Image: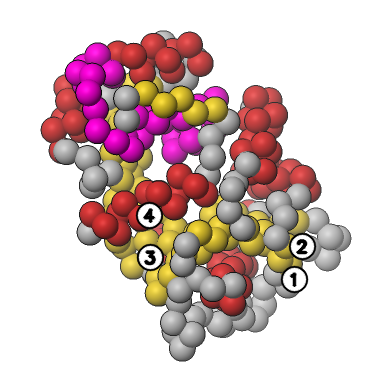
Amino acid sequence: MDSLAKTIEDLSLNAWPSHQIQFYDGWLLRFSYFYTHRTNSVEQIGPSSIPLAEKITFCEEAYRKWGTPAIFKISPLLDPSFDQMLADKGYVVEHTVRNMILPLDASLLPDADAGSRMAPGTVELSSFISSSWIEALFSLKGTTNIMHRQVVPSMYHAIPKDTICACVRDEQGRIISTGLGILDRNYIGVYAIHVHSSFRRMGIARRLVSTILQEGRRQGASRAYLQVVDDNAGAIALYESLGFSHAYSDWFRVKHLF
């Protein structure tokens, strides 16, 4: 389990860069104006030499300067006593994330059209993350925060790995769904699956994910992974129906500083 978790944690760090990063005694402080917990949190990537209480105080001050909560990501790779230390300091769990994996066996890969014959449009693929795709993603997510709209495009453009950028358009040519595959080692990571509310429950998300998986395998991936918030029952059901299984969970301890 630790070996798999270490691999997935490494891949997800590569896949989703933060706006700014600071290294501190084996810890990685990530800043993105609180766009997501993952890109605006502390991750432990090496051993510590400074007392933990001192390090936590340092991190709280760093995030206070950015005007965001102090967030620590907790994974199975960490000693459980650290999670308890944060709880004792008033940190609460805001959400838990399931890390799911899928072997990309050609005979088991889901059919992109299975169960989605009525879904509108075809999946368009590109190796480049365009500005129009990012704008569509903002629209689908309802992103209006000015700082997010300024810094997030650079975060997507900073992804250091090959990408599979996917979308589906309506009859007027507007993007109604997005998806992103990120290739690293022998894995394809699945990210940014969003569908416009007017086009949900039509099989579009299934078609998007299946197409990304098939293209990922065509480009050499033999395994897939993704992360989904634990209370997103609909997405979990979709991914399980595609063959993904739960590998492990991580969660975020948060303390609001203002």
Residue 221 rendering spot, x and y as whole percentages: 50, 71
Residue occupying the point 19% across, 31% down: 82
User: Which of the image's four quarters has the C terminus?
Assistant: top left
Q: Is residue 20 left or right of residue 99?
A: right
Residue in view at x 31 percent, y 51 percent: 6
Horizontal placement of 61 versus 154: left or right?
A: left
Circle on res. 101: 3
Marks 1 and 4: which is nearer the front? Answer: 4
- Whether residues under marks 1 and 2 lie with C-beta atoms below 8 angstroms apart, the answer is yes
Q: Earlier in the sequence, mark 3 or mark 4?
A: 4
Q: Which residue is mark 4?
A: 8
Gap in Å between the C-alphas at discs 3 and 2? 28 Å
**Residues marked 3 and 2 touching at CB (< 8 Å):** no
Q: Which region shows up in magenta?
A: 27-56
Disc nearer the start of the sequence (3/2): 3
Q: Nearer the viewer, mark 3 or mark 2?
A: 3
- Where does label 1 land, which residue? 121
Give yes or no for contact between labels 3 and 4 (Cβ–Cβ under 8 Å).
yes
